[in-house]
Image (cartoon, helix red, strand yellow):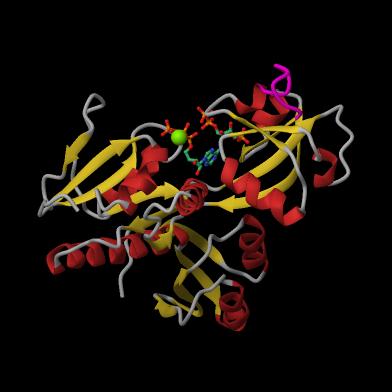
Amino acid sequence: MIESNRLRIAIQKSGRLSKESQQLLKSCGVKFTVNEQRLIAHADNMPIDLLRVRDDDIPGLVMDGVVDLGIIGENVLEEEQIERQTMSKPAECLKLRQLDFGSCRLSLAVPTEFSYKNASSLEGLRIATSYPNLLRRYMEQQGIGYRDCMLKGSVEVAPRAGLADGICDLVSTGATLEANGLYETDVIYRSMACIIQSTQTQTSVKQALIDKILSRINGVIRARESKYIMLHAPNATLEQIVALLPGAERPTVLPLSHDSNRVAVHAVSTEDLFWDTMEQLTALGASSILVMPIEKMMG
Ligand SMILES: Nc1ncnc2c1ncn2[C@@H]1O[C@H](COP(=O)(O)OP(=O)(O)OP(=O)(O)O)[C@@H](O)[C@H]1O
Ligand SMILES: O=P(O)(O)OC[C@H]1O[C@H](OP(=O)(O)OP(=O)(O)O)[C@H](O)[C@@H]1O
Ligand SMILES: [Mg+2]
């Protein structure tokens, strides 16, 4: 690790993970301003530096101990790990936790006119991908021989351009596949963003700061997944109403002034309250139902 008493965190400079990575750190109380031209952003209120890089570089920076933490898609992490293992390079890092964004899957896809039965339909054919290691692992598991066409971008256009017969690329809504006349056949890897730590973090001061950030991330994600619910419930249906609140434990029940037939119920729910549950609550006589976001949670 290059000596520095400031914690270094690598995040994607620009792309699918950059806004949410920055937002997550801001929600954890790290104050910084990003200058689009600059590689490094220094936090004003904590000894933390953010390194803004291509996402492909993040796992290597963490595994080589150049930075302490990184926020990265599990797909890129796993790809780099296999790559480094094959080349006998350091491939160790600690996955601290999965995050709540960057959800996508790595899938095989073929042109709409391709008659596909299973992965063996691709035997001997050429597959374009930016993830040669994850693709190879899957095809080896299936016992299928294929040819690689390594592309860093524009993978979806490869079949139409005559470069490959099929592709192995990231899918979220499927809109990009559809726009390119392709359909998804096999999901080979499901991915979310995650936060990783170098195994070389040296000082206890830095480790304490990492522990603090991680505990705050846990709080931010728990809060994002939770809702604060307030409603008025008739005494007669109180039990049924409380039972309908998703994941709510021990709600607070308060008397209402000038109304002895109803009570106010306040509860923290670990899930969103969906419209159909709201309608069931109303059918049980609940009124003044308020569902509010929670900003922070701890303890
Ligand atoms: N459509 C998507 N929806 C949600 N998450 C996605 C989607 N596509 C990719 N991701 C996740 O975001 C990560 C970054 O995707 P992005 O397309 O920004 O990468 P990139 O083009 O390789 O960027 P870079 O310029 O940093 O190399 C992916 O590795 C994956 O984990
Ligand atoms: O299934 P969809 O919702 O259409 O998403 C999938 C697309 O999203 C990603 O690319 P991105 O848009 O991030 O651009 P990129 O090709 O520059 O990486 C990914 O590489 C796919 O091309
Ligand atoms: Mg990349």
244 left or right of 63? Answer: right
Residue 190 in the image: above or below residue 146: below
Q: Residue furthest top?
A: 161
Quadrant into which the C terminus falls: bottom left
93 left or right of 274? Answer: left
Residue at image location 62% in from the left, 67% down from the top? 281
**Residue 231 spot, x, y in % from top left:** 49, 67
As for residue 206 lying within the magenta part, the answer is no
Q: What stretch is highlighted in magenta?
A: 158-165
Residue at image location 54% in from the left, 48% down from the top? 103
Q: Is residue 84 visible?
A: yes
Q: Can residue 33 be seen in this view?
A: no
Residue 33 in the image: above or below residue 225: above
Viewer-side residue, 278 vs 176: 176
Residue 252 in the image: above or below residue 65: below
271 left or right of 37? Answer: right
Viewer-side residue, 259 vs 276: 276
Viewer-side residue, 99 vs 79: 79
